[in-house]
Amino acid sequence: MSSKKHWSPGSDVAVQSVERSERGGWIVSGVFAPNGICPDCGLHSRRRHGWRRRRLQDYPAHGDEVTVDLAICRWRCQAPACPRRTFSDQIASIARPFARRTSRVGEIVTHLGHATGGRPAERLLHRLGLGVSDDTVLR
């Protein structure tokens, strides 16, 4: 498979690997910068507190589903006067908090929901390779 080096789910995400999943889709693994920026004081931190995985549904590629698998790091703020002890990487450019899909997929789902309604949009999205229920379309 030929890949574009500049392709990424977001401008602040570095793609580590693109692999075929067991179910036939693609899994894109990515990480953020090697340091975090405290949202309160703005200080850069390299002290990692922990990390977690975040999986998001993205646009299909050639009819196959694509899952973006991000490693979200939790950082320790090193400023003694800062009230925030730990903070995590912000992925606002890719997805909203607690979202299961990337923002660009969410926009398509919303537009189709407004244009066609719940069940017609659900059928069309399934044909396009985006498995979304009619209740989710109407939210």
Image: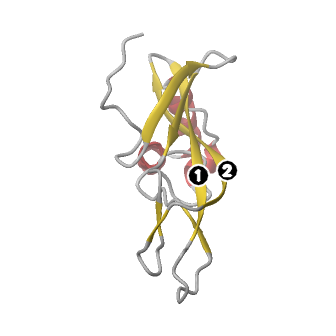
Q: How many neighbours does mark 1 have within 10 angstroms: few (below 14), some (14-19), or many (20 or more)?
A: some
**Residue 89 image offset from top left, x and y in percent:** 52, 59
Q: How is the image coloured?
A: secondary structure
**Residue 65 image offset from top left, x and y in percent:** 55, 25
Q: Which mark is residue 60?
A: none
Q: How many marks?
A: 2
* Residue assigned mark 2: 52
| Relative to 27, residue 53 above or below | below
* Among the two numbered marks 1 and 2 on one chain, the one whose residue lies closer to the N terminus: 2
Residue type for callout 1: Ile
The quadrant the C terminus occupies is: bottom right
Return the residue nearer the eye: 88 or 130.
Answer: 88
Return the residue nearer the eye: 134 or 79.
Answer: 79
**Residue at (48%, 72%) from the top-left corner?**
38
| Relative to 76, residue 9 above or below | above
Q: How many neighbours does mark 2 have within 10 angstroms: few (below 14), some (14-19), or many (20 or more)?
A: few
**Residue 114 image offset from top left, x and y in percent:** 44, 51
Q: Which mark is residue 72?
A: 1
Label 1, label 2: how far apart the Cα atoms are: 5 Å
The quadrant the N terminus occupies is: top left
Q: Is residue 121 visible?
A: yes
Q: Secondary structure at mark 2?
A: strand
**Residue 34 image offset from top left, x and y in percent:** 47, 51
**Residue at (53%, 85%) from the top-left corner?**
82
Asked whether the beta carbons under mark 1 and mark 2 sit within 8 Å of each other, the answer is: yes
Residue type for callout 2: Arg
Q: Is residue 99 visible?
A: no
**Residue at (45%, 34%) from the top-left corner?**
15
**Residue at (57%, 36%) from the top-left corner?**
122
Q: Secondary structure at mark 1?
A: strand
Return the residue nearer the eye: 108 or 76.
Answer: 76
